[in-house]
Image (cartoon, rainbow, N blue to C red):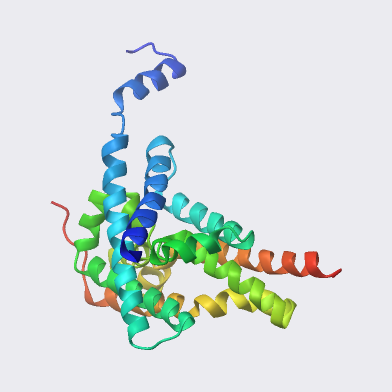
Amino acid sequence: MEYLTAFIVGGLICVVGQIILDSTSLTPAHIIVTFLIIGVILGALGIYEPIAKFAEAGATIPIPGFGYALSKAAIEGAKSKGVLGAFAGGLEATAGAIAAAVIFGYVTALISYPRSKS
Amino acid sequence: MDNMTNKEYQEYLKRKIPKPDYLNNSIRAFIVGGTICLIGQIVRNMLFRFGFNEKEVVTGTAIIMVFLGSLLTGLGIYDKIGKFGGAGAAIPITGFANSIVAPAMEYKREGYLFGVAAKMFTIAGPVLVYGIGSSIIVGLLYLIFTAGR
């Protein structure tokens, strides 16, 4: 059952992005950053939490889920450690993913070459 | 054609640029984005089965999905997924990995400092700046609004 909800919710988030992409002159990079900030805001307002509980990976794998993780951890950090936690919380919670992106990204770029576009 | 005003030319261009096929593009984005999330769900459930707790599973799933996104980009497969799925390939975290690897690969000939290492952050840079920046603002706002309680 959670596979179906993950598929549908994740798919719908991408459809929203696709419609914005098609109907405006925004680039995918704009959409990614906008969706990320929307995730941060929805996370802060407590709106993303129930979506993430319901759809699991369908909500956490799309980029708004990254924003949600950031703001949720910043609030938790602020609760437990005050100002220091507000600064460090978001990065602490997402450090694994960011570090993975840096190392896997670098190594992959080293060992592979762009395909010629035919 | 020769004596068009700027406005007329803009309208002429508008007529010439093909209209995107909204329905077709949306269906593709839905299928590709949904499938990537479905794979994420499979990874997530597997990690739970290995006995990791919620926090470890969230981080582990993100790391594995980033790895898969990088690998498929290196193999030239994610490009094809992106061409088919559009936003469906860009919005999941695998697309974030793709946005790091693709320009790094492309600019390798400009060296390992300003080529690979710098270009990795063409899109990841803005993502980190706005993501981390806004999360700090959220944390500080939380402190301000709860200070009186």
| Residue at the image point whose x is 39% and y is 66% from the top | A57
Of residue A25 and residue A66, the one placed in the foreground of this image is A66
Left or right, B44 with respect to A69, comes to: left
Please tell me in which quadrant of the rendered image residue B70 appears.
Answer: bottom left
Q: Is residue B146 visible?
A: yes
* Above or below, comparing residue A5 to residue B67 in the picture: above
Q: Image check: B149 left or right of B117?
A: right
| Residue A41 in picture, x, y percent from top left | 60, 57
Residue drawn at 44 percent across, 37 percent down: A24
Residue depicted at x 68% and y 64%: B137
Q: Quadrant of the C terminus of chain B?
A: bottom right
Q: Which residue is nearer to you in this view: B77 or B6? A: B77
Residue B78 falls in which quadrant of the image?
A: bottom left
In-image side of B2 versus A45 (left or right): left
Q: Is residue A106 visible?
A: no
Q: Position of residue B26 (x, y in %)?
A: 32, 42
> Left or right: A26 with respect to B35?
right
> Residue A112, position in %: x, y?
21, 72
Q: Number of labelled discs? A: 0
- In this rendering, the answer to whether A2 lies above or below A37 is below
Quadrant where the N terminus of chain B lies?
top left
Instruction: Give residue B46's position: percent from left, percent from top.
Output: 31, 80
Residue situated in front as seen by the camera: A5 or B78: A5
